[in-house]
Image (cartoon, grey):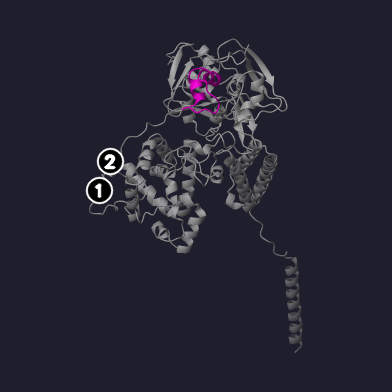
Amino acid sequence: MCWRRVLGVALLIVLGLISGCASLKSREVPPPRRASPPSSALQQDADIKVILQRAENFFRQGRKAQNMGNFEEALLKFGEAIDIITHSGLNLEDSPQLKGLFDDISSCVAELTIINEPELEPDIKTDIKDDLEIIDPERPQGEQPLSEEDKAEEPEEITYDIPMSFHPKIQAFIQLFQTDRREKMQESLKRSGKYLPLFRQIFEKEGLPKDLAYIPLIESSFKPLAYSRAHAKGMWQFIVGTALKYGLRIDWWIDERANPEKSCRAAARYLKDLYSMFGDWYLAMAAYNAGEGKVLRAVRILKTNDFWKIASTRYLKRETRNYIPAILAAIHIAKNPELYGFSTEREEPILYTKVPIPSCTDLQLIADCAQTSLHTIVELNPDLRRLTTPPDHPQYQIKLPEGSDEVFLANYSQVPPDKRVSWLRHQVRSGETLSQIARRYRTTVSAICQANNIRNSHFIRKGSLIVIPKGKPKYEYSSFVQDLHSNKKSPSPYQKGQRITYKVRRGDTIYRIALRYGTTVESLMSWNRLSPNDKIYPGQKLSLWVGTKIDVNNKTPLSSGASTVITYRVKQGDTLYRIASNFRTTVKDICRWNRLSPRDTIYPGDELTIYRRP
């Protein structure tokens, strides 16, 4: 009995010790901690915060400049903010705050860019793409699409690197391009010869189907300056936000959406991203047109990746539903134009060499140094928005005709830096007209229009920035370079001072004619009794003296008899009629001598050149 009692007590002691140890052990265990995020995620958050701060700083500076009306400075600051974001390597989708900032900056850039864009005209609008919103391929006009029995088979040697078919909508577009839109398609095919080899090479290098290079047949008809009503620009029709996202520069001086090579590379990267998202080229191209959000929504709602099933619904707008069959029809035609009744004539591929330009330089000077024409330089560099290379861009490369780089560098190196550009910048104020601006800077309306690609001289926006030709006119650069190299490849057939009769051709302006023959606009207008508002027409004949000009400080009036040249300062209450009466001349002569229109207003302090008759 005793040993049992002892055993029980011992057992109780052991159990107490075990429970005590267990409670002590439980007290020693620290409370569970929340799992800390990986160091890479913390680093990314820190990176995003730094990028946000830097970009927001430039964004605020840009908004301040924009509110003060300094649009060029605003675009510069917005561009720096965009560069910080795009060069950071961060994915915008990882940070809603970063994406929101990027979208805000893009909207501001778009607003300022649109101010200086031209009005839609036949030579820059997108043509075929604009039709996609209104045509109905299910009810084509004219002949009906070819039936399977009547349809000619394409040659076996023609291959495609994206899925192709003869869906009824594709047939309908082929027929549409053969009839109602035949002329537009033929022009687009002809123009494509200049750029297709380059585009196919770019897509091949990016590892994408080369047939995607045909997309501009529909997007822009292969026009580098194509501009849509949705403010998309260039052969690949980028809106501002997408262009900035894929590294294209847009500011007051340059818009790389119009750069064929750079915009094609951006389009290739964009299409590659879209294909990674959808895994289908039809859906990728549809998203290129409509935006990935709209296509993703349609795919999720309908639970299908079949474009034709999606296109049979209303989840995509008509333009996008027509976009894919139109492109596929255009590829069929481009691969075998003779089969579909189109000409095989194509423009020659555009060939060029790139040369770095260290400072802001007049395009006419560049043309002279390269021994080519201003038209050629402008055609090779459609991304330049002014007749000059951009300032503060030491890495900028100008495109020159292939093989002209050596002669250009030899000539350019001998031009003093202060002779390389002759421009002023002017911001349009409320109520200003081009005529007033031209008079203020002693230049012409036509010269300002050409320098700024202004097509309608009666329409300029308040706040828009324009460049004004100043100092030595561009035509004098030609003689400057000729003195350096007298053995030009194509010497002028005319002698200096030779009188010729020039027949105006389509597209001519007084400024271009004066530039071509080494004279001035003032001289040409005086010799032909023209006023600044007079228009010239194809077939009109003008007289001029090659390589000579009238000295504006000592020129004689067109009427006979000796005259005294005076400078008259306009007084309060003066009118053109009163001044003409005082000096025994006519309003027409005063206007001609001073590049004025009778409708122009003169202000106290303006200086007028008057030829006083004896």
Q: In this view, does 238 lie above or below 383?
A: below
Magenta residues span: 509-536
Q: Mark 2 points at which residue?
A: 338
* 570 or 523: nearer the viewer: 570
Q: Earlier in the sequence, mark 1 or mark 2?
A: 1
Q: In the rendered structure, does residue 49 fall within the stretch colored magenta? A: no
* 324 or 283: nearer the viewer: 324
Residue 122's label in the rendered image is none
Q: In this view, does 311 lie above or below 128?
A: below
SS type, badge 2: helix
The residue type indicated by label 2 comes to: Glu
Q: Counting other residues with Cα less than 10 Å from the Cα at mark 2, is it few (<14), some (14-19), or many (20 or more)? A: few
Q: Name the residue under label 1.
A: 153
Q: Is residue 2 left or right of residue 110?
A: right
Residue 595 appears in the picture as rendered: yes
Q: Counting other residues with Cα less than 10 Å from the Cα at mark 1, is it few (<14), some (14-19), or many (20 or more)? A: few
- Where residue 351 sits in the image (x, y, percent)? 42, 29
* 119 or 408: nearer the viewer: 119
The residue type indicated by label 1 comes to: Glu
